[in-house]
C-alpha cells in the first residue's frame, strides 16, 4: 500500500469554461468554473507529504458506455464540432414520450438535458471524459489494492448525470463509472454527501441490489433537483430497499450532521456489508457556499471523514460540488486528512 493518498487529476479538465447559467429566470455567472479545481489542486500541492498527485491515462470508452447511452455520447460529440467560443444552452425541453430526438442536431440537446444551467461547447467532451477518467483510475487504484483510499479531483462533477441525460453541471456520472468498475469485484456502497440530491446516481442503480446508494442532502422541495430525493424513493424490483435518501434542514450544523451519519448512514452501510465504499464528496455544504444552505465549517470535514474511516473499507472519494472557491481547497484537504 502506498504511504501517500493518491489524487487523480488531468489538466484537460480545465478546458471547459462555462460563462453563465440561467437560474430561476436570472442570468448569473456560472458557479462551476475552473477556479474550483485550481483551488483544490493548489491546496493538494501544499501538502506534498500527504498527497501524491497522479495524472490518469485516457478512460476506456467502454467504461463510459457501461453507464451512459450512446445517444448522450453522440450529442457531446456533436457539441465538439461547435466553433471556439460558441456555447449552446438548451431552451426547449420536450416531453420525452412525444419527441423523436436527433443527437447529431445540437438544437435537440434539450431532449437530453433537464435544466438550463448546463451548457455545451466544443470542450465539454474533453473535460467530462478526463473527469470520468480521474474517477475511473481512482477506483482502479483501490480495486487493485495499490491504495486503501484514493481521491479523484473530478471536475466537472457527475452525480446529477443519468444514463441518458445531463444537467446540474454534470455530463458523465463519475460515481457510477467508478462503481461499475468495482462492482466486478464485490458489493459497492455509494454515499453522496453533496448538498444536492444525487439524482443521476440514484436513477442508474435504482433497480440494482449489488450497489447501495445513499444521499444526504438539503430538502429537494426547496433546492435542486426539486423533483426527486425524497425518503419514499427506495428502489424498484430487486433494487427495492437499496436506495436511501436522507433530508436535512437548512442551516444544519456539524453535530446534527454527524448524528445523521452515525445513527442512519453507518448502520445502513453495516447492514449492506459492502466490499467498497465510494463517497461522492460535495462541499457545497460549507457555510459560505453560494448554492448550498448548510452551516459546516472547514474543520468539520475532517470529523465527517473520520466517521467513514472507522468503517475500514477500501474507499474512493470523488469530487462533486463546492462553489465557494476561496475555501474549497481547504475544505477538501480537511476531509482528505481525515483518511490520512
Image (cartoon, rainbow, N blue to C red):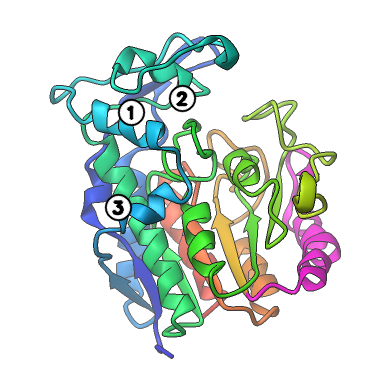
Neighbor class of circle 1 (other Cα within 10 Å; few <14, some 14-19, many 20+) is many
Q: x, y percentage for residue 8? A: 34, 65
Q: Residue furthest left?
A: 84
Q: Position of residue 49 (x, y in %)?
A: 35, 83
Does residue 214 appear left or right of residue 154 in this picture?
A: right
Residue at the spot 66% in from the left edge and 29% down from the top edge: 223
Dot 2 and dot 1 residues touching (CB under 8 Å) = yes
- The reply to whether residue 331 is visible in this rendering is no
Q: Nearer the viewer, residue 265 or 302?
A: 265
Question: Is residue 205 left or right of 138 when viewed as pictured?
Answer: right
Relative horizontal placement of residue 112, taking residue 283 as reference (left or right):
left
Residue marked by disc 2 = 112
- In space, the residues marked 2 and 1 are separated at their CA atoms by 8 Å
Front-lying residue, 35 or 100: 100
Q: Which residue is mark 1?
A: 75
Q: Earlier in the sequence, mark 2 or mark 3?
A: 2
Q: Secondary structure at mark 3?
A: helix
Q: Quadrant of residue 218?
A: top right
- Of badges 3 and 1, the one in the foreground is 1
Magenta span covers which residues? 246-275
Q: Residue at x 42, y 33 (%)?
A: 31
- Residue 138: image tag: none
Label 3 environment density (alpha carbons within 10 Å; few <14, some 14–19, many ≥20): many
| Mark sitting on residue 130 | 3
Q: Is residue 190 visible?
A: yes
Dots 3 and 1: beta carbons under 8 Å?
Answer: no
137 up-or-down from 39: above or below: below
Q: Earlier in the sequence, mark 3 or mark 1?
A: 1
Amino acid at each position: 500500500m502506498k504511504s501517500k493518498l493518491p489524487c487523480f487529476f488531468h489538466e484537460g479538465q480545465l478546458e471547459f469554461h462555462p460563462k453563465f447559467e440561467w437560474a430561476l429566470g436570472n442570468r448569473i455567472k456560472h458557479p462551476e468554473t475552473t477556479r474550483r479545481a485550481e483551488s483544490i489542486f493548489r491546496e493538494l500541492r501544499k501538502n506534498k507529504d500527504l498527497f501524491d498527485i497522479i495524472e490518469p491515462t485516457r478512460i476506456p470508452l467502454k467504461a463510459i458506455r457501461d453507464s451512459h447511452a450512446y445517444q448522450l455520447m453522440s450529442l457531446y460529440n456533436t457539441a465538439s464540432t461547435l466553433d471556439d467560443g460558441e456555447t449552446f444552452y438548451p431552451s426547449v425541453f420536450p416531453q420525452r414520450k412525444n419527441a423523436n430526438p436527433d443527437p447529431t442536431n445540437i438544437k435537440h440537446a434539450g431532449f437530453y438535458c433537464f435544466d438550463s444551467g448546463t451548457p455545451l461547447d466544443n470542450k465539454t467532451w474533453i473535460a467530462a471524459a478526463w473527469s470520468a477518467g480521474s474517477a475511473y483510475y481512482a477506483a482502479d487504484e483501490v480495486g487493485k489494492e495499490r491504495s486503501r483510499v484514493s481521491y479523484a479531483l473530478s471536475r466537472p462533477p457527475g452525480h446529477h448525470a443519468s444514463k441518458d441525460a445531463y444537467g446540474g453541471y454534470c455530463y458523465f456520472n463519475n460515481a457510477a463509472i467508478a462503481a461499475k468498475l468495482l462492482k466486478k469485484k464485490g458489493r459497492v456502497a455509494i454515499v453522496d454527501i453533496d448538498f444536492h440530491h444525487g439524482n443521476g446516481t440514484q436513477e442508474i442503480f435504482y433497480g440494482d441490489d449489488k450497489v447501495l446508494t445513499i444521499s444526504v442532502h438539503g430538502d429537494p422541495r426547496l433546492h435542486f433537483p426539486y423533483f426527486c430525493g425524497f425518503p419514499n424513493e427506495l428502489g424498484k424490483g430487486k433494487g427495492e430497499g437499496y436506495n436511501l435518501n436522507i433530508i436535512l434542514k437548512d442551516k444544519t450544523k456539524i453535530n446534527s450532521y454527524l448524528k445523521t451519519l452515525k445513527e442512519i448512514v453507518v448502520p445502513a452501510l453495516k447492514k449492506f456489508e459492502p466490499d467498497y465504499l465510494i463517497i461522492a464528496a460535495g462541499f457545497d455544504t460549507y457555510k459560505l457556499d453560494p448554492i448550498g444552505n448548510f452551516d459546516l465549517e472547514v474543520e468539520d470535514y475532517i470529523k465527517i471523514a473520520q466517521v467513514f474511516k472507522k468503517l475500514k473499507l477500501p474507499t474512493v472519494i470523488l469530487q462533486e460540488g463546492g462553489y465557494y472557491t476561496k475555501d474549497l481547497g481547504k475544505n477538501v484537504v480537511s476531509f482528505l486528512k481525515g483518511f490520512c
